[in-house]
Image (tube, helix red, strand yellow):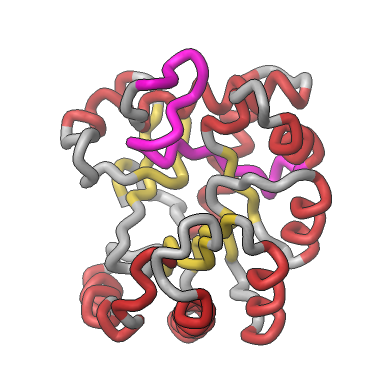
Amino acid sequence: MWTDSHCHITHDGVGSHAVDEARQAGVTRLVTIGTDVGLHPHDAAQGVDSIVPVLEEGLTQGSVVAVGECGLDYHYDHSPRPVQRDAFAAQIALARRHDLALVIHTRQAWDDTFAILSAEGVPERTVFHCFTGGPDEARRCLGLGAWLSFSGIVTFPNAGDVRAAAAMCPLDRLLVETDSPFLAPVPHRGRPNRPSLVPVVGAGVAQVRGVPVPAVEEATWASAEAAFRLQGRAGPV
């Protein structure tokens, strides 16, 4: 059984059929990421107060397992960088206050990401989603006690650094995700991604580690349980 640790099944191009399709592919647990139980850095200018009512409602219903995705994106800079940094710090505080996992998006912003985490205090359960660094960044993340979540990028021809990070990441700190509908793995490039393709990502990770695919399947299931406290839960969460 596989867990897709990061997907957007409510996004255009995915659709509700994605859950049934995933189940048929052996992906029986999905962590659905919203941008309203976490303020994406692109939307940081909206202010963290905009997500608090949704977060509190989700906590009451028991449907929220993390704050995210949130962080820094210095590639697009859709929100000013100081605003991104303030929003990220505020969401770290939310995750710590509510004892939730923190799901981090970081792009071309490693130094500031680590600096803010150091200043605010790293939540007990922190996930670097769609990990795009190499072994050096991986070691820094792992040194914080974080999990690394690998996407279809691990199958891209030009992603040697990401594969090197996947090869050295301890299995109990390794997650797999689709980030669907984005980043479809090879050989599905050019089409919308979907949670049913998590086994393709897992196979890519297994190949670079030189281990059987079931070893990655089993380890990432357990890692997702630990990172998001999913014991006894299946399906979308």
Q: Quadrant of residue 188?
A: top left
| Main secondary structure type of the part rendered in magenta | loop
Is residue 106 visible in this depiction of the protein? yes
Residue farthest to the top, as pictured? 187
Relative placement, left or right, of 150 versus 90 is: right
Which residues, given as a range, are shown in magenta? 169-190
User: At 48% across and 58% down in the image, what residue appears?
Assistant: 228
Q: Which x, y percent locates residue 85? A: 53, 79
User: At 31% across and 58% down in the image, what residue appears?
Assistant: 34
Relative placement, left or right, of 85 versus 113 is: left
Q: Nearer the viewer, residue 160 or 127?
A: 160
Q: Which x, y percent locates residue 215? A: 66, 26
User: At 64% across and 54% down in the image, what residue appears?
Assistant: 147
Relative placement, left or right, of 81 versus 162 is: left
Q: Up-down: is 123 above or below 183?
A: below
Q: Up-down: is 226 above or below 185?
A: below
Q: Quadrant of residue 214?
A: top right
Q: Which x, y percent locates residue 32? A: 33, 50
Total numbered badges shown on the rendered structure: 0
Relative placement, left or right, of 197 versus 133 is: left
Q: Up-down: is 36 above or below 222?
A: below
